Amino acid sequence: MRSKSVPWGINPSVLLAAPFLALVIVAALWPSLLATADPLATSLPEALQPPSSEHFWGTDQTGRDVWSRVVFGTRFSLVVGCGSAFGAALIGGAMGISLGLAPRWIDGILLRAVEVLMAFPDFLIALIVLAVLGSGPKNVAIAVLIGAVPAYIRVARAETLTRLQTGFVQASTLLGRNRWHVALHHIVPTTVRSLLVLATIGVGTGIVTAAGLSFLGLGTQEPAPDWGLMLAGSRNKLSQAWWLALFPGLAIIGTVLSVSVLSRAVQGRQDFRGHLRVSSRRSRGWLHRDELSR
Amino acid sequence: MTPISPRSNRSRQVHVIARAVLLRLGGLVVVLWGTVTLAFFALKLVRGNPVDIMLGTHGQIAPSRRAEIESDWGLDLSWGEQYIRYVVRVLSGDLGTSYQLRKPVAQIIGDQLVPTLQLSATALLIATLLVSLGALLGRRRWMRRVLGTVELVAVSAPIFWTALLLLTVFSFALGWFPVSGSRGLNSLVLPAVTIAIPVSAMVGQMLRQGIERAEAEPFIETVRARGVGPGRLLTHHTLRHAANNTLTLGAYIAGSLVGGAVLVETIFGRSGLGRVMLTAILGRDIPVVLGAILVIALVFVVVNTAVDVLSAVIDPRLSGSFVGASLVVAGER
């Protein structure tokens, strides 16, 4: 795959995405800096007010400030998104590398098991995991992580197999290095690097999956602020209060978009061997970015 | 992987394809068996005694009656025995009985399959139209930029949010479509469009990447030099090259729609397989969850196997090596 990459400073989408993501991170770390009201404070006289100077994303059924609730909901979304993506990359990576290095018959059997898991969309796996674990925010995080693992196993295994064919690995084997040396010094570093880039894209997927599970009422429970839960609450008021659905959704889209724009920018700058290239404008994408979605 | 031989003779090719198909079918059976096994034991870990689940919250019964129910449902056997019994029953087409609805699982799922397939098919149709439109529009460079941005936004938008927006605009503000329900063609439009938006964006991205990659190949220069215009170049040359990965992704998505439409079905109040599964999961109705998982996996592997075979027809370079979708990944390099 070849992508036209533009250096960091010039690409307008990066210029938009980076500050936005910075804002999201601030909201996750210090929500009270950005929030204008207590996210839990109800005030029935002020219920369902459209956006105004006082409540600039309006208020919900019980008069809570939508902006503040979105701000306070950031932390959970971001923690689940990052935690599930990087956790899944770690677990899936370890499993995939071992699979790639394992004797062929073990690889063959376990690969089938992975294919079984791949037959289900992330969301459905997460749902099944929740059926076993029971609902709740912590279990949602675990479920999203488990749902994401199969894709990483597959990528890590494919990467490992490719690396085994490369000249430097074969040279190392010919030099008499044992399997463990080759694995630790040649396979793991390169594969981990590619998985990390892939995981940055997975952050967005994780956020959306977690929001979807919360939306179904399986995650965070009222009155805690949560993006998916806020959207679920907006369903009954769609005809009267468009702002209830619009703004939490924009928060999700904005976060997911900026994460994926930035990770693509990083991916575009990454050389075949994983070194950052500064001078060259042409990049050699070495990992299919749609790998995650399959 | 397998070396590519451009000039293999016909009979050998047929032999290779037949072998690959057989291998695929074998793999298909293994995947389904694996699914049943994994799901069966995973769902054994669900907390709560099945008898309590059957009784609901208000149930209080004598211990003797409880033992009777357990032996009726085979719940007093060991997990291994229960598993063997289940597999044997599944092979004879019996998916068990629902804890809560007391109806055969096969019947429950059968009832829901029609609305699910309707929704999936309509969504795929709309998505195909959108993708073709994108490919046609994307002949110009600046248009590709625009399309790329639109696709990125469409992929990032959570499907339940798109659904809510469409509902707000087209059902509440304009009143064109019903708010919920699964009766009539009119109620099919919004859910199908909701699903088609991210699907077409994902597939469109893949297709355009493929077209761009094909355009960078030297043979395209030759074709251009012969005076072939951009339209014909697309339909006769680059599209065929790009079609393969696109089709694989499309099949993956199509296969996952059957169970993946849970959110959309819930929002639009449609009946369907995803919805049944969600209800069963919430109610810990394990036989139904198991049955739904099996059917979803079946649809998925059948669709994907069919497309794997089809892609060998589209791209003859693959015919020697289409044993698994994993080869598509390896073939990238």
Image (tube, rainbow, N blue to C red):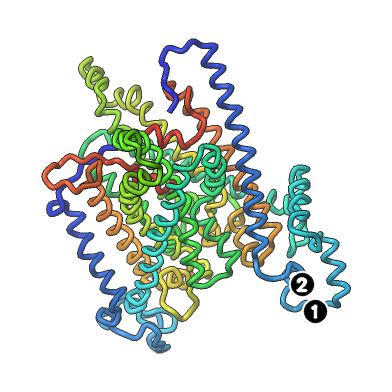
Task: Tell me the residue at 65%/65% (across/down).
Answer: B46
Up the image or down, B314 lies above or below A211; here it is above
Few, some or many C-alpha atoms within 10 Å of disc 2 (few <14, some 14-19, many ≥20)? few
Q: What kind of residue is marked 1?
A: Gln
Distance in Å between CA atoms under marks 1 and 2: 8 Å
User: Looking at the image, which is closer to me, A252 or A185?
Assistant: A185
Residue A10's tag is: none
Of the two numbered discs 1 and 2 on the same chain, state the one appearing first in sequence. 2
Mark 1 Cα-neighbour bin, 10 Å: few <14, some 14–19, many ≥20:
few
The image quarter containing residue B66 is bottom right
What amino acid does circle 2 point to? Leu
Location of the C terminus of chain B by quadrant is top left
- Direction from residue A145 to residue B219 in the image, left or right: left
Q: Which residue is mark 2?
A: B55
- For label 2, the SS is helix
- Give residue A31's quadrant in the image: bottom left
Residue A226 lies, with reference to residue B333, above or below; the image says: below
Question: Are discs 1 and 2 less than 8 Å apart at CB?
Answer: yes
Specify the quadrant that holds the N terminus of chain B.
top left
Q: Which residue is mark 1?
A: B60
Q: Is residue B330 left or right of residue B148?
A: right
